[in-house]
Amino acid sequence: MVNTKNPTPCSSSSKAYETRDAIADIWGPRTPYKHEWPTRVEERLIDEPEKWVQSANGCGLDIGVKDGKVVGVRGRATDRVNKGRLGPKGLNGWTAMSHPDRLKHPLVRKKGKLERVSWDEAMNAIVQRVKQTQARLTNHGIGFYTSGQLFLEEYYVLAMIGKAGLNTLHMDGNTRLCTATAAASMRESFGSDGQPGSYADIDYTDCLFLVGHNVSHTQTVLWSRMLDRLDGPNPPKLIVVDPRRSDTAKRATVHLAPRIGTNLALLNGIQYLLFANGWIDEKYVSKHVVGLEQLQTTVKNYTPEHTEEITGVPQHQLKEAVQIIGTTKSLLSTALQGVYQSNQATASACQINNINLLRGLIGKPGSGILQMNGQPTAQNNREAGCDGEYPGFRNFQNPKHVQEIADVWNIDFMHVPHWAQPTHVETMLKHIEHGSIDIMWISGTNPLVSLPHLQQVRDLFTKPDLFVICQDIYMTETAAMADVVLPCAQWGEKTGCFTNADRTVHLSYKAVEPPGEARPDLSIFLDFAKRMAFKDKDGNDLCPWTEPEEVFNAWKKMSKGRPCDYSGLSYEKLTGGSGVQWPCNADNPHGKERLFTDGKFFTDIEYCESYGHDLETGAPMTKAQYKSLNPAGRAILKAAAYRPPLETPDEEYPFRLSTGRNVYHFHTRTKTGRSDRLQRAFPEAVVQISHEDAQDLQLEEKDMVLIRSRRGAVELPVVIGNIEKGQVFIPFHFGYFDAKDERARAANELTIEQWDPISKQPTFKSGAVSLTKVDDLEPGTVKIHARQRQSEAVHRVESNPKPTDKEGGDQLKRRLAPWLGATHDALNTLVEIYDEFIPKLVQDLDIQSGLRLMCSMTHEIIDHLQPYIEKYHENRRYSAQISHDLRDSLFSLSRDSDSFRVITTLQAVDLFVTYIDGYLTALQPASMALWDKGFVDAVGFAQAQLARQQAWARFHLKTKSPQTLLVPVPVEVDL
C-alpha cells in the first residue's frame, strides 16, 4: 500500500489532518504502474472518529463518525474503482452535510409563502392534490422529474409509484441532461444499455481515446489512474477530442480540437481513414457485426480534406490520430458531455462504438467502451426505469417484456404504461404549458438552474395552476418556488445501493441521523404509496416494504435474466470489501468485468431493449425493420451523415457557445457550493475565450463582459486562453441561491432549447452568442435581473386546481370525443365510397367484385368501434364536412380513359384509407392510456382491417399500372 508520508494539517485541532490538500493538488502524487494500479488510501478528518462506516459516493469510501456527526472520510483500500483514492469533492464535499442551510422540516405554501408544517399535513396536501388532478385530468396530469443521485432502492419504488401505481408515462430525470445519450447509443449499437468496458481496462490498454470527455475535471480519480499509467512503463497513447486545451488535452499524444457541434463529421472522417487504410478486423466484423455496407457508403465522403473543412481539424493531425487508433493492439474509448450535449449526440456516440467494433477491440482486457455517466447513480435511474427506460432494460415494444414487468409487480398487463415512448422532460414542459400536466414532483434536482432556456422554464414552473412538489436537502432555486417542500436525508444519512459507470454496485450504509425531521427519499415514496392505497391485482399493498434491503431483494427479481442481473448480489456480499460488477448471477457469482467477451451482444429480437432509430431523423424502427437487419446477437454499425447545428454563428452572434463542468463543482452547486473549500476554490462563474478573441475585443483577464444569445444574457468576468478562436465556454454550475448582486450568471439563460432527436438530451454545447465589454455599453443598457425574477418566483401564489364541471367552473373538454366523431364520420364516408362512388367511376369487374367485401369490412370496423364511440363520444354531434370534402376531391368523374380512371381511383382509395388510419394511429395509444382493453382490441381490429383494404387497393394498383401507363392510347383521349 502506498500512502502519503506527511499528512497536511487541516484545522487547529491536533486530531484534524488530511493526507493531501486536494484543492491545491487535485490528482495527488503519481504512482506509476502497468497492469495493477497501486493502492493509496487518502483521507481527511476534522476530528478523530469513534467508528468508521462503509459508504460510497462515486468512489468507495468510509465515513468517520464521532458523537453522531460525520468528522471525516477515507478511501476504501479494497475498492476496485478507486483503490483508496478520493478527489477534491470526495475529500471536501462531505462538510456540507452540516451546513445551516439544510432543510429540516416540511414546508407548504400558504398565502404565497412557504411555512413549516407537520409531515402529515405536507403529505396530506400532496395526496389531496393528486386525487383532485386524477379526477380532473386523469393520472396523465401528474409528472415526475428525479435525479441522478438517489439510491437504486429509491428509484425502484419511484418507478413503481409512477408506472404501477399511477400508470403514467410522465417520468424523467435529470440524467436526461447528462447521460441519456450514453444509454441511447448502447441500445442502438449493442441492443441494450450496459457499459461494455471496465475501469480496469485503463491498466492494460495501449491507447486511450477520449471523445468530449475532460476526465481531469469530471472524474478526478479516474484521471489519477490514467496519469499513473501515462507516467508508468510502456504508457498508452492518448488521443483527446476537445475544443478546449483542457488539463486532459495537455497530456495528449494527439489533441484534436474540432469546432463545436462537428463531432459526427470528425468521427466519420476517422472511420473513412480506417477503411481506406485497411485497419479493419475483417474476421471479427464478418462474424459479430451487421451494417457494414451502409456505414461504408455513409463515411466514404468524409475524406481528410472534407473533414477538415467541416471541423477545422488539420489533416495531418487527423491522420496521426487514426494511425494510432488503426494500429493499436488494444483500445479503450470513452465519451461524456462533449459528445452527449452536442449536435447529433446519439449519432456521434454510436460512431465511437463503431470504431471499436471495426477494430474488433471490445470485450478484451484493455479494449472496450465507456459511455460515461455524469452523476453517481445515473446508471440506477436507467436500470430501475425512472427516466425513459423500463425496469431491467426491458423493451416496451415487446409484449413479453411488458408481461414480465406486470408479473413481477402483480398488476394487469394493460396497466403497465407502454402505449408510447416515456415522456421526457421537454415534452412534460409542453404539457405544463398547455395545462394537461398540473402536478410536477421533483426529487433531488434543480431544474430552475439546470434546464435550457431558463426564462421559459421559470415562466412554466411558476404558473399559478401548476402544483410543484420538491424534495431536496437544501432550499434550491427550485425548492424556493415549490408548493410543498419535503426535507430529505442525503448520502451518509440513509442506506442503499448505487452503480457506477463500469457497472460496479456499491452499498452505502447509514452513518448518522439526518437533521431535524428530514427523511430518506425511500421513506417519502413509501409513505405516499401507502397513503394513496396503491394495490396489486390481488388487493395487496403494491409497495409493502419498510427497509431498503427488502426493496433491494424485490429489485433482484425484476432484474433477473436481464443484462443488469443483480440476482446473485446481496447486502451481505456487498459489505466489507469492494463493490461488485453486474451481471452477478449463477453464471457470474463474482460479477463480470467486461461484457461481450464472447462476441455475443444483446441484440436478439426477443431480448433487446430497443429496436433502434434512424440516427438522423430520430424515427424509431419497427420490429419488422429491426428483424430485417437480422442482428441475432451481433452488434449493429449505425451510420449517419453530418448535419450542421440548428443555430450557428453569424454577424450578430459570432461566437459558438459551450457549457460544462469545473473540477471543484457538481451539477448546480447544491452541495459543493456549500462546501467552504470547494466554493472558495472556484467562487463565481466565468467566460473562457481565446487569446485572439480577447485581443480583437480589447479584453483583459477579469474584465466584465455581457454575453448575449437569442434567449437571454449573462454578465461574467473573462478568463483567457486554452480554447479555440471563435468559441466560448461557461461553467453551468452557477445559479442564484448565493448571488451577492443582481447580475445574471446562469449559463442556461443563454442555451438553446434543442434536443437530440433520439436521446432527447439537450444540446447545451450549441448555439451562438455575442460578447460586449461592460465598460463599452451605453448607460442604461438593460441587464437581466435574475435574482429579482427568482424572488418573484419565491413569493408566487400557491397553486389551486381549476374547478371541474361539477364545481361549476370552467368546463373541461377532452379532445377524444371530437376525434372519435371524426373517425366515425370518415368510416361512414368510406362506406359511401365503396357503395356509391366507385361503382359510378369504375366499370372494371375485377375491382367491383371486391367492393362488396371492402364495404362489409368497413361495416365490421364500425360495429367494433360503436360501443366505444358511444362510451366516449359524450353525445356530441360533429360535422362530416372534412371527410366529404376529401371524398369529393379524390373521387370525381373525369374524361380519363376507363383504365386510367381505375388506377387513379385505386390511388384515391389508398389515400382515403391512409387518412382514416391516421385517426386510428392516434386512438391506439390513447385507448391503451385509458386502460380499456375492449377499446384497444377494437382499434387493433380496425387497423388490421384497414391494412387489408389498403393491401387490396395497392395490389390492384400494381397489377394494372404497367399496361395503363406504358401502352400508348389514342390521341383523342385527354389524360
Image (spheres, rainbow, N blue to C red):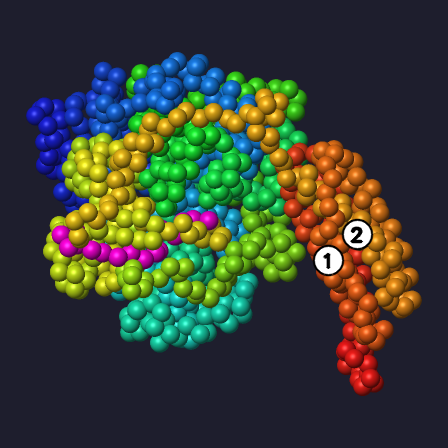
Residue 886 is marked as 1
Instruction: Identify the secondary structure beneath mark 2.
Output: helix
Q: Are marks 2 and 1 in contact (CB under 8 Å)?
A: yes
- Dot label at residue 829: 2
Please say whether residue 757 is visible from this viewpoint. Answer: yes
Distance from label 2 to label 1 (Cα)? 10 Å
State yes or no: residue 372 in magenta. no
Residue sitting nearer the eye, 737 or 560:
737
Identified at 38% across, 20% down, the residue is 111
Crowding at mark 1 (Cα within 10 Å: few <14, some 14-19, many 20+): some
Label 1 is placed on what type of residue? Leu
Q: Residue at x 85, y 57 (%)?
A: 834
Image coords of residue 160 (percent x, y): 53, 30
Left or right of 850, for residue 282: left
Q: In this view, does 923 lie to the left or right of 680?
A: right
Asked whether residue 522 appears in the rendered view, the answer is no
**For residue 773: magenta?**
yes
Category of crowding for the residue at label 2, using alpha-carbon neighbours closer than 10 angstroms: few (below 14), some (14–19), many (at least 20): some
Task: Say if 153 sits above or below 220 in the image.
Answer: above
Total marks shown come to 2
Magenta residue span: 760-776
Q: Which amino acid does label 2 sit on?
A: Thr
Quadrant of the frame with the N terminus: top left
